[in-house]
Amino acid sequence: MSVPALPSESLMTVQGLPYPLKAKGKVREVFDLGTHYLIIATDRLSAFDVVMPNGVPGKGILLTQLSLWWFAQAAKIFPTHLVPNHDAALKKVLQGHEYLIPRSMLVQKLTPLPIEAVVRGYLAGSGFKEYKKNGKILDHALPAGLLDGSRLPQPIFTPSTKAAEGHDEAITCARCEAILGTNLFRQVHDTSIALYNLGHERAAQAGIILADTKFEFGTAPDGSLVLIDEVLTPDSSRYWPKASWQPGRSQPSYDKQFVRDWLEAQPWNKTAPGPVLPADVIARTQALYQECLAKLMG
């Protein structure tokens, strides 16, 4: 699979489909097809839980194509929410709207779990802040002397709740187990670690470090667990160029950190509406997403 050509204009909202809109998230819109859901990734960009007035042209295409590629890898070890014969089925439901195909997924109707499965292989972000304060991350004891960007002795599972509004709340494994039940918790935990290791190994082959990521799972009517949402994209993961990795400082990254850094320097109180992103910030963000996808997918 090659890196797709990108449109010059951003798709900020989906219009004209004959299907009812089930949900509208910060980036994606979900349509109800009766037996399945149609998930379409727009080019909207959010930061600090605020959707920016302008998006990144083709961002939804890049995220969707990378997710589909990772779903194909993940399916070798765990079931995913994509419908059988996905590409043919998607073309059928989007007849007359073919321009939406590269940014769309057709998926099973499942019941999402009330937690996000976060796996960290390196110390960064909120994890590093907690480590500096407490010497650990939640209920995970860690060695002394680790730096910002240090690799952890082994990947750790640090789940969070899903907040309807505002920020998600990081929770201990014990609390996650209480929410899910022991058997389901163990399955989510072990599968998340296995998927992280799969992603970390493939990223390393491409000269990229997968520092951390989050997965989402749902249950089928028979109670079986299924991987859903998006997988190992720059929106759900922290990717670093391996060549420039240097513990002890903030790492260059293939995600929205470039946008966040620009926003931090603006006279903005981090509430809606956000500032209009300048053309150079949009172009740089688009280039980072494209570079990450091209390297990972080879």
Image (cartoon, grey):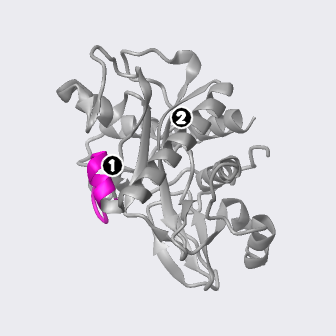
Position of 43 compared to 162: left or right?
A: right
Give amino acid for label 2: Tyr
Position of 7 compared to 226: left or right?
A: right
Is 7 colored magenta in this rendering? no
Q: Are the residues flagged by discs 2 and 1 in contact, CB closer than 8 Å?
A: no
Q: Is residue 191 above or below residue 161?
A: above
Kind of element beneath mark 1 = loop
Residue located farthest toward the left when viewing the structure as drawn: 133
Closer to us: 296 or 118: 118
Is 168 colored magenta in this rendering? yes
Location of mark 2 (residue): 254
Kind of element beneath mark 2 = loop
Give x and y (percent) for residue 185: 40, 54
Numbered range of the magenta stretch: 162-178
Location of mark 1 (residue): 48
Q: Which quarter of the rendered picture does the C terminus lie within?
A: top right
Give x and y (percent) for residue 251: 44, 23
